[in-house]
Every structure is written in structure tokens, then in C-alpha cells.
Image (cartoon, rainbow, N blue to C red):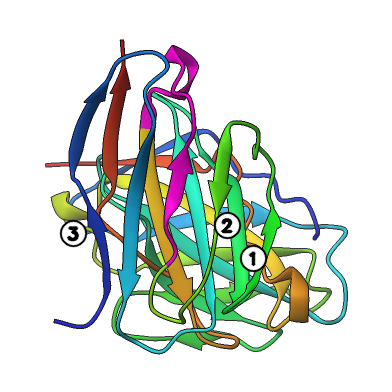
Amino acid sequence: NAGVTQTPKFQVLKTGQSMTLQCAQDMNHEYMSWYRQDPGMGLRLIHYSVGAGITDQGEVPNGYNVSRSTTEDFPLRLLSAAPSQTSVYFCASTGQGYGYTFGSGTRLTVV
Amino acid sequence: DAKTTQPPSMDCAEGRAANLPCNHSTISGNEYVYWYRQIHSQGPQYIIHGLKNNETNEMASLIITEDRKSSTLILPHATLRDTAVYYCIVRPLFSGGYNKLIFGAGTRLAVHP
């Protein structure tokens, strides 16, 4: 099915560990974004990309890295996980001028 | 992007119309009004967007005032499955290198039997 696929769905990390959250879309969308959502809060933009090879920071970029080597994939890397990064992470994509399609989320707990 | 103001919560009886307001008094001429909703920790779902004319699709209707400073999302026959947080977002249709979607707090709609 067409859409945005996020893996894993759940993850528990220890403080200081690193990991990569995967995001892939098969709609040939140029624009992709990563958001985090803390309990009871709205979504906050972490990083976004307007095309392969182009990324930029959002509202809360500290502690996260991204790259965009292909149109389809937009991985989010946590270099040294901290408890403050416990959250639900959503990836989204859109073509020019249309509504964003969101993935189902990755629920990350850092202990 | 223009800032939006929404009520934090609303209630609606099942089968009745749900009218969700949004104020965006600083909206610019090239900015569209987008509506998304998030059902219980799922990823947000696009509902509808519009510039100045009223819009309707299979999910909802969007009414934008003539001065474009406010809008209303209408769910014509709300069901229990429409219980969600609804986000009103104002942004250009295509803003080149700044194609960001910034979420506010939204309106928590509770549909009850």
C-alpha cells in the first residue's frame, strides 16, 4: 500500500545509545519531515527535507541528525539518546501543495 | 506563517454537525488554511484545505470568512470515530525551501452518544 512506512514501531534505548529511526515513502514526494510528540502535547518539527541532498532544521533539532540520499528515505539518527528524547516520532511526506501523509509513528523510550 | 487560535476543547452529540472554529487574523494573501486531525496517538490525518472559497470533500466542509481572518471546519454528521484533536494550520501552498507544517495545540473534539 502506498504511504509512509516507519520502523521500528516501538523501541527502548538506554541513555547514551544511538539508533536510527527509518522512514520510507513510495509516493515520489519531494518533501519529508520528522516530528516528535510528547505526551499531551502537539507535534514539534525536528528536521525537514525539500529533496534529495537537502535538509534543514525545524523547531527542536538538537540531538538529532538527518540525511536524504534518496527521494524515498529520510532516516532520523539519535547519536546519544537521552531520557528527554522519550517521545513518539512521526515522519511525514508531501508532494507540492498537497496535504501531508503521516506514518504511524515510532514510540521511543529512553531509560 | 500566520498564527492560529482554536478553542482547546469542544463537545458534540453523535449525528449532529460539529463546527470547529479557527482564528487566523494575520493570514497573508498567499496562505492557505489547512485542517488535520489526530485520532488517539495515530499519525495526523489531512482533512481539507482552502484559500478563500468554501471547500467540501468526503470528510468535511471548510468555510472561510470573506476577510479570511477566520474559518470553520464542519463535520456534517459527527460519529464517535470523529473524536480526535483537530489542528488548523495556515501556510503557503508551496513555499519552496520552507515547506514546513507547524502544529499548534489544536481543538480536542469529543463526540458523545
Badge nearest the viewer, 3 or 2 = 2
Q: Which residue is drawn at 18% across and 59% down?
A: B15
Q: Distance between the residues labelled 3 and 1?
A: 22 Å
| Circle 2: element type | strand
What's the residue type where badge 1 is placed? Answer: Ser
Q: Where is residue B69 in the image (x, y as percent from the top left)?
A: 79, 64
> Tags 2 and 1 in contact by the CB under 8 Å rule?
yes
Label of residue B71 in the image:
1
Please, is residue B27 above or below residue B29 in the view? above
Which of the two residues, A59 or A56, is positioned nearer the viewer here? A56
Query: As drawn, is B100 to the left or to the right of B13?
Result: right
The verdict on a common chain for dots 3 and 2 is yes
Which of the two residues, A104 or A30, is positioned nearer the viewer here? A30
* Subunit bearing disc 3: B
| Circle 1: element type | strand
Q: Residue at x 61, y 82 (%)?
A: B50
Q: Distance between the residues labelled 3 and 2?
A: 23 Å
Query: As drawn, is B48 to the left or to the right of A102?
Result: right
Please, is residue A59 above or below residue B89 in the view? above
* Subunit bearing disc 2: B
| Residue B97 seen in render | yes
Task: State the extent of the magenta-drawn residues as a range.
Answer: A74-87
Tag 2: Cα neighbours inside 10 Å, few (<14), some, or many (≥20)? many
What's the residue type where badge 3 is placed? Answer: Gly
What's the residue type where badge 2 is placed? Answer: Cys
Query: As drawn, is B46 to the left or to the right of A104?
Result: right
Can you identify the residue that label 2 sits on? B88
Can you identify the residue that label 3 sits on? B15
For the N terminus of chain A, the quadrant is bottom left
For the C terminus of chain A, the quadrant is top left
The verdict on a common chain for dots 2 and 1 is yes
